[in-house]
Image (cartoon, helix red, strand yellow):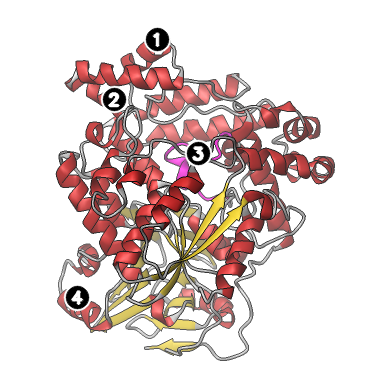
Amino acid sequence: MRGVTCGGFWFVVLPDCGAASAVAERVRPLACRVVRHASGRPWLVGCWPEERATLAEAGGVRLAVLGEHALTVAQLAARADAMYGRADAENTVENAVSGCAGSFHLLASLDGQVYARGALSAARRLYHVVCDGVSVGADRARTLAWLTGARTDSRQLALRMASLVAPPYPLDSASVFTGVQAVPPEHALRLDRDGTARTSPWWRAPDTTVPLATGAAGLRQALRDAVAVRVRPGELWGADLSGGMDSTSVCFLAAEAGARLVTVTVDWNAPGHEDLRYAELAAARLPASTTRLTYPSGCLPRYLSGLEQRPDAWDEPRPLRDLAAQEHVTRELRAHGIGRRLSGQGGDQVVVPPVCHLHDMVALRPLRALSRLVGHRARRRWSRTATARALLDRGPLRRWLSVQADALARLPGTAGAEPDLGWGRSVRLPPWATPQARRTAADLLREAAEQALPLAPTRGLHAWAYQVRQAGRNVAPFAHLLGMPIASPFGDDAVIDACLRVRPHEASSPRRYKPLLVAAMQGVVPETVLRRTTKDGPTTEWHEGMKANRRLLAAWCDDSCLAATGLVTPDGLRRALLGPYTLSARHGPAVEATLTIETWLRDLAHHPRPAYLKEHSCESSSTP
């Protein structure tokens, strides 16, 4: 394969049938790479840097690992050779990456039968669609939407107004384009020779039986391996050093691996904030060669700056409140010779199990569970009646989804301080959502309830697995828009697996902050940082950004894309974006979710063809 490409990263995966040639011909002028099935037909078409791809073959077996990993061609070729000729080769594809650290797509062509999957953290996704009569896969939903002319699904957008994070499972992995099917992160896509598609699980939730001390040792090794896959001694890396435990852990592991770091710290403008102090304490213990970049938030572009600009839209609406500030930081990093950046993103979702594990624990250790619930109830202001009612609810996931649908169709308004002891967070649409939005979102939940199966046998482990599916969702959009690879070790499958094996009641405590990560980083991260129990955020910056953009937001209310879909009324949107709701802790996340979708719709309209799908002036490279 040619060593120089356009710098993009995307691919289409095709079945081994003649009917797929029409799709291949449409995308080939936009691609740097073509990899073929053993039959000679195109299998993978797209753009990716050579250093982020390992490809091997043996007989009719083709294997590709795209992303961040340490597999060599020789190692992958040996694994391909072990699969060649086996009658059960299709069921042993995962052996090709067994024990491999990193974050990647795994793809295989086994005598023309295609197997493909992404990462459990949703940092690397897969989608499929019927195009020109055959099923086609891709790592980007927008690629398939462009190929088929798919429109946005207003039902999915309506449900996404209910949460800034993600819709409830299983709709959290759904595509927002009609006809484009998302492959759930824990499933693999299989394309048969007749051009049809199906999915099957490649991951199952592990048993949560490992004690904290043992689990901490496993997490420490998994994080070390995850960093070592990316970092080589002497390499120059940018690294977030927020003062929080997640990014600090990644910085010290990178320094331990021999990286030369340029760290980035933002000093938030909130009274009593502690991020800068803890970042300085950590920086004092990093190697003397470390370069520090510290930015008072007032010296960076305001939150929500650049709303009038129209960057290329991601595959789904994602919060990009500080995009302008991150663009500024990225330029500064490039000026220091940085081409890659390390992040602690995903740590919150991966190392801390959700509170609803206490719902399971009540049946096994009632006194201990109730004791912990007292602490959570006091901190989160749950009423005794609501907490008792939540503990007594033993209904399955399907019933929970149906209850949420009924409440959504009936009740406007956002959820209050309800106990987080269900199969997920309560689903409520904000007051500015139309009755149509509530009805369509409720219909989606009812449809999901008909066949939904939990990710794990217990409510707590299911909710934890759902959390980790969100760990990588925000990293990929920023990396795409900033044009700089961002590595997030907490989103690696091996790191997730190490955490999910730990007993939830030991990995979480209302009185201790991130006990699993604290135990894992003993002797790696300074003790002063490990003792931290607070967490800061850019709340002040968010409100200042909303106020600074009032004129633009007012103009948007007059020609709103969301209002055009019938999901909000112009007056309701005006009250949401310009009224007192923006200052309310209860409605703040719903306001941001609404603004995120409105911005995304405008970006999408401005870029009907994804910007990364660009004509290539030179002939695409090809491998046999």
Q: Residue at x 40, y 80 (%)?
A: 51
Q: Residue at x 20, y 69 (%)?
A: 89
Please name the amino acid that badge 3 sits on: Pro
Please name the amino acid that badge 1 sits on: Arg
Q: Residue at x 30, y 68 (%)?
A: 257
- Residue picked out by circle 3: 167
- Residue picked out by circle 1: 384
- Residue picked out by circle 2: 358
Q: CA distance from mark 4 to mark 3?
A: 38 Å
Please name the amino acid that badge 4 sits on: Arg
Which of marks 1 and 3 precedes in the sequence?
3
Which of marks 1 and 2 precedes in the sequence?
2
Asked if residue 42 lies in the magenta stretch, the reply is: no
Q: CA distance from mark 2 to mark 1?
A: 15 Å
Element type at mark 4:
helix
Which of discs 3 and 2 lies nearer the camera? The answer is 2
Q: CA distance from mark 2 to mark 4?
A: 42 Å
Please name the amino acid that badge 2 sits on: Leu
**Residue sitting nearer the eye, 444 or 371:** 371
In the displayed structure image, the side of residue 107 where residue 522 appears, left or right: left
Quarter-of-image position of residue 22: bottom right
Which of marks 2 and 3 precedes in the sequence?
3
Residue 478 seen in this snapshot: yes
| Magenta segment | 162-176
In the displayed structure image, the side of residue 247 where residue 218 appears, left or right: left
Element type at mark 1:
helix
Q: Residue at x 39, y 41 (%)?
A: 467
Image quarter (top left, top right, bottom left or bottom right) of the N terminus: bottom left
Element type at mark 3:
loop
Which of marks 4 and 2 precedes in the sequence?
4
- Residue picked out by circle 4: 79
Q: Is the C-beta separation of discs 2 and 1 under 8 Å?
A: no
